Amino acid sequence: MAVDPNSRLPNEDPKIEGVQASYSVGSYVTANCTSSPSYPPARMDWFINGVKAQQWFLDYYYSDKPISDLNLESRTIGLKFQADSSHFHQNEGYLSLVCLATVADLTRTSENKAYLTRLTKEKFAQQFTNYHGRIKAEFLLLVVLVVVIHL
C-alpha cells in the first residue's frame, strides 16, 4: 500500500481508559480507546482475547474538527459487552482487551488485562441475602396486590 506523502503517523500507542482491574460474570465491561493524532485518522479496532470484537459491542466517536493546522485527528472507539465465563481464559482467569490504531501500514497497539472476580464467602453471603430480601419484598407485594384486588 502506497503511503500518502501528506500522512502524519501517530507518535504514541493508543490510550485505553475505563477498564477495571476485575469483573464478575454478568457485569458489563466498558472501555474507550483513543488514538494519538494522525492524518489520515486512524482506523480503530478492539480485540477480546485475540478475537475481533463484535460490531454491536462498539461505539465510534468522531471529532468534527482537526487538532491542528496539519489536519491531524484523533479517533476514539468505545467497547461495551456483558462478561460471561467464556471471556476469561480458563487457567489464568483473565480477559485480554487489545486496541489497535492503524494508519497506512503502521499499527500501534495497547493491551489491558482484567481478571475474574473470585466469589468469597462474604460476597456470596451478601448476594444471597440481597436475593433472599428481594424475594421477600416481591412476595409481600404480591400479597398486597391480592388483598387489594379482593377488596
Image (spheres, grey):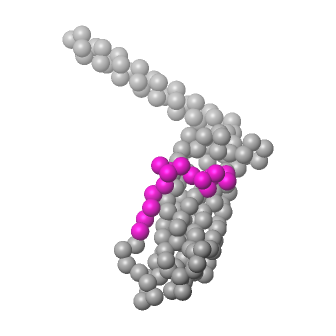
Given residues 24 and 40, the one toward you in this image is 40
Above or below 31: residue 90: above
- Which residue lies most toward the front here? 2
Q: Is residue 18 visible?
A: no
User: x and y percent of residue 135 in the render?
Assistant: 47, 24
* Quadrant of image for the C terminus: top left
Of residues 44 and 3, the one drawn nearer to the viewer in this rendering = 3
Residue closer to the observer: 123 or 97: 97
Relative placement, left or right, of 51 versus 70 is right
In percent of the image, x 37 and y 78: which residue is there?
65
* Quarter location, residue 86: top right
**Image check: 57 left or right of 123?**
left
In this view, the residue farthest toward the bottom is 69
Up-down: is 36 above or below 52?
below
**What is the magenta range?**
47-62
For this orientation, the residue located farthest to the top is 150
In percent of the image, x 61 and y 78: which residue is there? 12
Name which residue lies at 60% across and 74% down: 1
Corner quadrant of residue 87: top right
Is 7 included in the stretch rendered in magenta? no
Furthest residue in direction left, as rendered: 151
Which x, y percent locates residue 146?
Answer: 30, 14
Where residue 143 appears, as percent x and y from the top left, is: 35, 16
Residue at (53% x, 82% y) in the render: 4
Q: Is residue 138 visible?
A: yes
